[in-house]
Image (cartoon, rainbow, N blue to C red):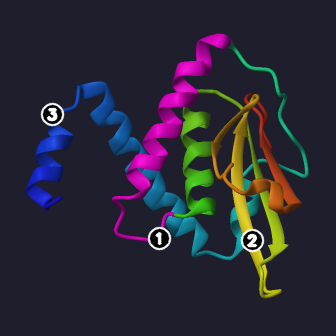
Amino acid sequence: MNIVKKVRTFFSLDMKTMLLFTEAFIYLGWARILKSMPFSKVAPTLGIHMNETSLSYNESDRMILKNIYEAIHIMSRYTFWESQCLVKAIAGMKMLERRRIESTLYLGTAKDETGKMIAHAWLRSGPFYISGSEGMEKFTVVGKFAKKIGNQKG
């Protein structure tokens, strides 16, 4: 798909979707910048270390969660930078935080088929996975960050 067709498709969307996709694109960029920084500087902004948010959720948030899931996954394919698991998880967390919805970001490690250490990140809000759920069961959780709403530290 050439750039003109992509732009035309984007502008054929309704305004609410265009704004959500634009927000996702911006947060993916912000998250990519954060990923390039030392993790010790970024970690305090991710929430309460080694804590989790509840599995409960407000039914009224279900559509918001679905829309953010879709926006993150769609827009990550159109960034000029790497937008893999950690970038998507941070971007999703920030989008949920803007809407005052709690989330937990998980960091996991595993060994690939050659024995090399690999890492993965995923994001959960209530019982729903916003990003990174594909393959997460293969990873051992080594860190988690709870973004609780109304919390000064998180």
Rendered position, 94 above or below 40: above
Tag 3 near tag 2, CB within 8 Å: no
Label 1 or label 3, whichever comes before in sequence order? 3
From the top left corner, tell me how far across and down residue 15 is, in percent: 24, 27
Q: Name the kind of residue labelled 2 in the image.
A: Ala
Which element is circle 1 on? Answer: loop
Write the start and end of the magenta stretch as one range: 59-83
Q: Is residue 98 left or right of residue 149?
A: left
Question: What residue is rendered at 77% in x and 34% in y?
Answer: 148
From the top left corner, tell me how far across and down residue 115 is, in percent: 83, 86
Can you say which quadrant of the picture contains the C terminus?
Answer: top right
- Circle 2 Cα neighbour tier, 10 Å, few/some/many (<14 / 14–19 / ≥20): some
Q: CA distance from mark 3 to mark 2?
A: 38 Å
- Circle 3 Cα neighbour tier, 10 Å, few/some/many (<14 / 14–19 / ≥20): few
Can you say which quadrant of the picture contains the N terminus?
Answer: bottom left
Which element is circle 2 on? Answer: strand
- The residue labelled by disc 2 is 119
Of the numbered discs in the image, which one, if any, rests on residue 82?
1
Label 1 or label 2, whichever comes before in sequence order? 1
Picture quarter containing residue 149? top right
From the top left corner, tell me how far across and down residue 131 is, in percent: 62, 47
- Circle 1 Cα neighbour tier, 10 Å, few/some/many (<14 / 14–19 / ≥20): some
Which element is circle 3 on? Answer: loop
- Does the magenta-highlighted stretch encompass residue 116? no
Q: Name the kind of residue labelled 3 in the image.
A: Ser
For the stretch drawn in magenta, what is the main secondary structure?
Answer: helix
- The residue labelled by disc 3 is 12
Question: What residue is rendered at 47% in x and 51% in y?
Answer: 27
Question: What residue is rendered at 59% in x and 35% in y?
Answer: 96
